[in-house]
Image (cartoon, helix red, strand yellow):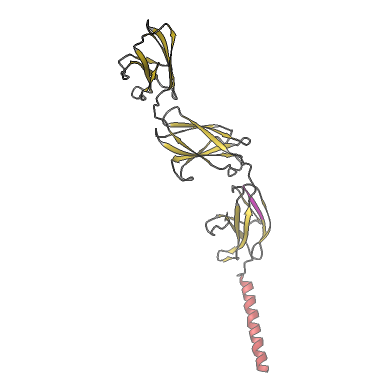
Amino acid sequence: MKTTIKILLLFASVFLISACSSEESGDSCGKITIENYTTEPTTIYVLFNKRNNVNSTRIEIGPTGFNQGTGRVITTSDNTVYFENLNPSTTYDLYFTGICSDSNESVVTKLSSITTDQGQCTGVASATFSQSTGTSVTLSLSYNSSSPSYYEVEYGPVGFTLGSGTRVNTSTQFISNNITLSGFQSNTTYDFYVRAVCSSAAPTDTSNFIKYTYTTVSSCPAPINLNSYITSGTCSTGATRMFTWDSSINAQNYTICVVRAGDQPSYTSNAFTTSTTSKSLSNVTCSFIGFYVRANCSATESSSWSGPYYF
């Protein structure tokens, strides 16, 4: 019986020595505990407690369900952490790890499924397109809910994946509703994604991207909306006739060609040049039945002929 008691006392002494040795060595690193948190549309603020020998805390954040090691990380010696530039109405997970030394960390504390508040950008951004040349495109932008700080546009070849294109924005200093982009190929189709950023202080508070598909015009597009009418006289005696058209570019000049039945347009046969989108010709007889017009964008580049317009 005495032998049994001695053995038990020996085991107890070994256990106490081992426990004291473990505490004195500082191997225990206290687990982080969460006190409180608050959310805004693009931020999460967390107050937490450090225990025992914790010197600093590593916090990792990512969308709910993300794999640890792939999120955004902040290390702090404070008892608070403030994550900015998050997405509104999005649910996040946060992992807290106390760091006592390079080789001694606490077990992880997880703060699950924290959802940011709804943002200000609940409206829809839209765009209309225009071109002055074949290589530049101007977007006129609008937003149907209040006035955003600026707009973001991402573009690329038709079918490109959002995030892999070219992204630009209008000025962050003042609201600009137009943006002109360059470097496009003529007669080519592109996708454009447009959204509003409601506050420059919170650039992740945005409306949803709206997709547009747009085909660029020729580098020297042909005139449109041809028209002709007599301003004086009659064709039997030789009328004075006005010829008009519209153009989507500011061409250097235009060439019109008045034709008889069966004629094709040419520069040498009944052709006239004007710097405006109209031309008045006199002595136009009844043998002439229509006209063509083309834009001359430079000394070496002209559009195709538009027409014939029969009168």
Whether the magenta-drawn stretch holds residue 45 is answered as: yes
Residue at horizontal 53 percent and vertical 34 percent from the top: 127
Q: Quarter holding the N terminus?
A: bottom right
Would residue 227 be found to the left or right of residue 97 on screen? left
Would residue 46 be found to the left or right of residue 169 on screen? right
Q: Residue 8: in sight, yes or no?
A: yes
Query: Residue 151 lies in what quarter of the image?
Result: top right
> Up-down: is 91 above or below 185?
below
Main SS of residues in magenta: strand
Query: Residue 7 lies in what quarter of the image?
Result: bottom right
Q: Quarter holding the C terminus?
A: top left
**Residue 10, horizontal then vertical, whole percent:** 64, 86
**Residue 63, horizontal then vertical, whole percent:** 57, 54
Residue at the extreme right: 35
Pick the front one: 229 or 210: 229
Would residue 211 be found to the left or right of residue 259 on screen? right
Whether the magenta-drawn stretch holds residue 258 is answered as: no
**Residue 36, horizontal then vertical, whole percent:** 69, 56
Q: Residue 272: in sight, yes or no?
A: no
